[in-house]
Image (spheres, grey):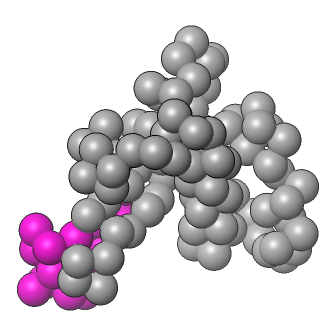
Amino acid sequence: MAGAPIAGHNVATERKFLSRAFPLLGASVCWLDTLRCFRKAMPGLASYKLEALLEALNLTGRVREIVPEGMPHDALYDATAAALLLEHLLADARWGALELEHLASV
């Protein structure tokens, strides 16, 4: 995973667990936080919780298609949801044109 970007929604949890499991990763990981990105991309929303963003972007049904037995806060459900949020964000030409380092620094 060294050198590969890792995306998640509010990545603090993922960072904590992966750092424990793989202590040598250290600073070699590029973290992309969809929570932070969407706060910049869509200012003024009432909530930036994962489920609220999925609803706002009409992505809940797509997550349920991919993870039919999943529920919010299940690892696979949340990872799929974060991936779809990132995909949605990068489909926007303004965000998709950004360098990885800039996305990670948002």
Q: Position of residue 43 (x, y in %)?
A: 53, 17
Q: Position of residue 82 (x, y in %)?
A: 58, 57
Instruction: Report the residue at 15% width, 80% height from top.
Output: 25
Instruction: Report the residue at 57% width, 23% height from top.
Output: 42
Magenta span: helix, strand or loop, mainly?
A: helix
Decide if residue 12 is on the left or right side of residue 27.
right
Instruction: Report the residue at 38% width, 68% height from top.
Output: 6
Read off the magenta span. 10-29
Q: Position of residue 14 (x, y in %)?
A: 36, 66
From where the camera sits, is residue 61 visible?
A: yes
Residue 22 forms part of the magenta stretch: yes
Tell me if residue 26 comes above or below residue 87 in the rendering.
below
Decide if residue 35 is on the left or right side of residue 66.
left
Of residues 46 and 106, the one nearer the viewer is: 106
Quadrant assignment, res 49: top right
* The furthest residue to the top: 44
Q: Position of residue 21 (x, y in %)?
A: 25, 87
Decide if residue 46 is on the left or right side of residue 70.
left
- Tell me the quadrant of the picture where the N terminus can be found: bottom left
- Tell me the quadrant of the picture where the C terminus can be found: top left
Tell me if residue 66 comes above or below residue 52 in the rendering.
below
Residue 12 forms part of the magenta stretch: yes
